[in-house]
Amino acid sequence: MVICSALGLHEFYRMALPGRSGGCSLPTGCGALLPLLFYYGFGAQAPAFLTAATLAIALFYLFSVNDLKTSATEFALTVSGFLYVPLLLGHLVLMRELPHGIQWIFLLLLLVMSGDTGAYYVGRSLGRRKLYPLVSPNKSVEGALGGLGGSLLGALVAGGTFFPELTVADCFLTALVIGPLGQMGDLFESLLKRSFGVKDSGTIIPGHGGILDRLDSILFAAPALYYYAALKGIS
């Protein structure tokens, strides 16, 4: 998660702040440390860490002004990236520490991957109505519904194989909540890329783009599933 956070932040800042890419090492380094706080049980100190990082970033921009007209935007984008990538991704570390943490993580991956697969094939074969053409012209309402069905199938497979502690109600709830959140995470990253004028977040994965292109759904889905799992408290 440390490596993924660092790579994801690097990609985000390269898209959002191409003129500041050399000055983003501070927030990238701080962001990469956040999953370590969660891993070593210092999650309660995360607000203090985020506060200190925000102040450090603010001071950095205060004393390294390139253009007064863009300084506020640069600061906002830097803090946004810091919250978007490592804070959301760090919930995977928290999830791992829960009872049946490995099973919850595999459930998350199965929900997202089966949802992506269902959306792709149903959208390709039956897609007619555009879902959100302003952000993602190729996605359809039919594909989104197919993704929801794929997530439900994935949850039921998890409950019937490696995660028998899941009830049928758990399968339906996680599919109906986590599945759409994963799709919205994908849409949100598409919004960012269109806003920044890039096709892919990076080139680290040949043929698939960057690390953010692979993690966009998980970024939105992981926190929601973590809090569901924590509240449910399967033991």
Image (cartoon, helix red, strand yellow):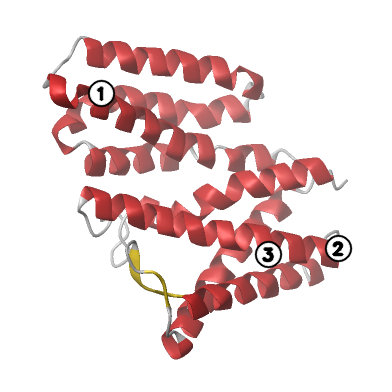
Q: Quadrant of residue 47?
A: top right
Mark 2 belongs to which amino acid?
Thr
Q: Nearer the viewer, mark 2 or mark 1?
A: 1
Q: Is residue 180 visible?
A: yes
Of labels 2 and 1, earlier in sequence is 1
* Residue on which disc 2 sits: 167
Mark 1 belongs to which amino acid?
Ala
Q: Is residue 24 above or below residue 5?
A: above
Of labels 3 and 1, earlier in sequence is 1
Q: Is residue 97 above or below residue 48?
A: below
| Residue occupying the point 80% across, 72% down | 160
In the foreground, 86 or 221: 221
In the foreground, 234 or 55: 55
- Label 3 secondary element: helix
User: Cα distance, mark 2 to mark 1?
Assistant: 48 Å
Seen in the image, is 216 located left or right of residue 201? right
Seen in the image, is 117 located left or right of residue 20? right
Of labels 2 and 3, earlier in sequence is 2
- Label 2 secondary element: loop
Q: Quadrant of residue 157?
A: bottom right
User: Cα distance, mark 3 to mark 1?
Assistant: 39 Å
Q: Nearer the viewer, mark 3 or mark 1?
A: 1
User: Cα distance, mark 2 to mark 3?
Assistant: 12 Å
| Residue occupying the point 14% across, 33% down | 19
Q: Is residue 163 visible?
A: no
* Residue on which disc 1 sits: 72
Task: Say few, some or many: other residues with alpha carbon within 10 Å of mark 2 (under 14 / 14 to 19 / 20 or more).
Answer: some
- Label 1 secondary element: helix
In the foreground, 154 or 142: 142
